[in-house]
Image: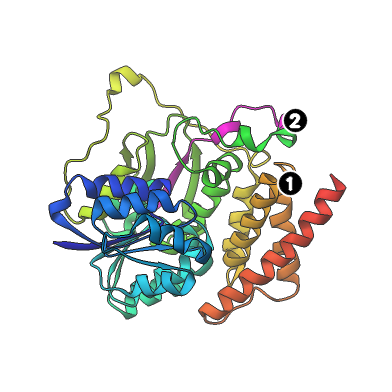
């Protein structure tokens, strides 16, 4: 019986992971489930999967969670320390689906146990890719990508040599505003940005899809996980979201991964790896689909892609600053403090300011350096939001 834990179980990735595990309860022993404010759903999941432990990130919600789980025998905990303790519990497979930089430390603690980390938290690699990969090597742990694009690349590389790869193409739906006139974008509202044409995801990642910051993070993630050079990594807008990635080899061949926009495929691949098992996902009818469309992304529409390439060129701790500034800018947009198009301006101002101060230099990455950079970037971004919001 495989021991599993799910970090971020009440989010979209977590819910899909719970769905797959619940379909074969005889195969899994659930060690820990963690979530945020939705403690009612967290309790439901813990009962359904007979988990050992349920953890909410918010200490003030511990009693409510305890009330929901009273008499079940399921342990309850809350807060950051409890999250890290849960990550240290022995498990064979851990899903890292906490959104944002908050997922970094639990992921590192899990890797220190020598476990397999199914990584849906792309921010960990963006903020501290070198540290994450080094920790996995040191402790004999494995990291399996769960983003649909990176899972697709990994599957296309099975049996292939990295040295034979010329380029990697990751696709993007283009999000809610892919066909909007550019002049309309400054007036886009959080509600409009929160509607994805293809994927069913949480609000934050859906808005990040509309701004293409999600794809910018994935470009950096591709470099950090696979080791490709920035020049090898391309982005194509693919409105149907059926081709998740393509890998081009030195003989001119392109290997494409094609599948429905259902995260259970990438999750299931990581959950069952190295086996490939039957999954409850749609089987595509290509004749009915008829055609697949691709186009180059416009960096005037999506400046986040340009910023991602600048981050890779700067190196050091610029990924941590980029992600922190992005998270702060997203918060400000959702709070209507800045416009949709101001998010990229906030991130760019933070990167330029911190790079000019020398705060992004780093000889050897350490967790305390990453956390300090995250803190400074958020402070700098808050100042930029005030300035840009006032100017707007």
Secondary structure at badge 2 equals helix
Colour scheme in the image? rainbow
User: Which residue is the site of mark 1?
Assistant: 342
* Up/down of 138 relative to 28, above or below: below
**Is residue 205 or residue 38 the one in the foreground?**
38
In the rendered structure, the answer to whether residue 377 lies left or right of residue 99 reads right
Q: Quadrant of the C terminus?
A: top right
Q: Is residue 365 visible?
A: no
Residue in the image at 65% along x and 51% along y: 331
Residue 309 occupies quadrant: bottom right
Q: Quadrant of the N terminus?
A: bottom left
Q: Which residues are magenta?
A: 166-184
Residue in the image at 42% along x and 69% along y: 83
Secondary structure at badge 1 equals helix
User: Which residue is the site of mark 2?
Assistant: 183
Indicate whether residue 172 is drawn in magenta: yes
Residue 165 occupies quadrant: bottom left
In the rendered structure, the answer to whether residue 193 lies left or right of residue 349 reads left
* Up/down of 304 relative to 289, above or below: below
């Amino acid at each position: 019986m495989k021991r599993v834990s799910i970090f971020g179980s009440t989010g979209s990735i977590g819910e899909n992971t719970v769905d797959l595990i619940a379909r074969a309860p005889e195969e899994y022993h659930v060690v820990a489930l963690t979530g945020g404010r939705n403690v009612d759903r967290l309790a439901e999941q813990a009962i359904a999967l007979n988990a050992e432990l349920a953890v909410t990130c918010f200490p003030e919600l511990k009693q409510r969670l305890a009330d929901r789980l009273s008499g079940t025998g399921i342990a309850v905990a809350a807060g950051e320390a409890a999250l890290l303790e849960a990550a240290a519990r022995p498990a064979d497979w851990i899903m890292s689906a906490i959104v944002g930089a908050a997922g970094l430390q639990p992921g590192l603690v899990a890797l220190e146990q020598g476990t397999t980390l199914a990584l849906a938290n792309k921010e960990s690699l963006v903020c501290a890719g070198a540290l994450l990969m080094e920790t996995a090597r040191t402790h004999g742990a494995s990291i399996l990508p769960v983003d649909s694009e990176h899972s697709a690349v990994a599957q296309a590389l099975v049996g292939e040599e990295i040295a034979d790869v010329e380029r990697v193409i990751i696709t993007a739906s283009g999000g809610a505003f892919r066909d909007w006139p550019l002049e309309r974008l400054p007036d886009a509202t959080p509600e409009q940005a929160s509607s994805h044409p293809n994927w069913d995801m949480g609000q934050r990642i859906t808005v990040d899809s509309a701004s293409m910051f999600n794809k910018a993070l994935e470009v950096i993630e591709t470099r950090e996980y696979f080791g490709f050079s920035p020049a090898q990594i391309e982005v194509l807008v693919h409105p149907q979201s059926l081709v998740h990635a393509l890998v081009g080899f030195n003989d001119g061949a392109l290997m494409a991964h094609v599948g429905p926009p259902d995260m259970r495929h990438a999750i299931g691949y990581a959950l069952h790896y190295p086996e490939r098992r039957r999954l409850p996902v749609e089987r595509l009818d290509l004749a009915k689909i008829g055609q697949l469309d691709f186009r180059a992304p416009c960096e005037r529409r999506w400046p986040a892609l340009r910023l991602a390439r600048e981050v890779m060129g700067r190196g050091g701790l610029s990924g941590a600053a980029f992600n922190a500034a992005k998270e702060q800018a997203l918060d400000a947009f959702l709070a209507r403090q800045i416009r949709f198009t101001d998010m990229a301006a906030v991130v760019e101002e933070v990167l330029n300011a911190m790079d000019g101060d020398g705060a992004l230099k780093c000889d050897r990455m350490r967790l305390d350096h990453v956390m300090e950079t995250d803190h400074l970037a958020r402070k700098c971004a808050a100042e930029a939001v005030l300035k840009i919001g006032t100017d707007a």
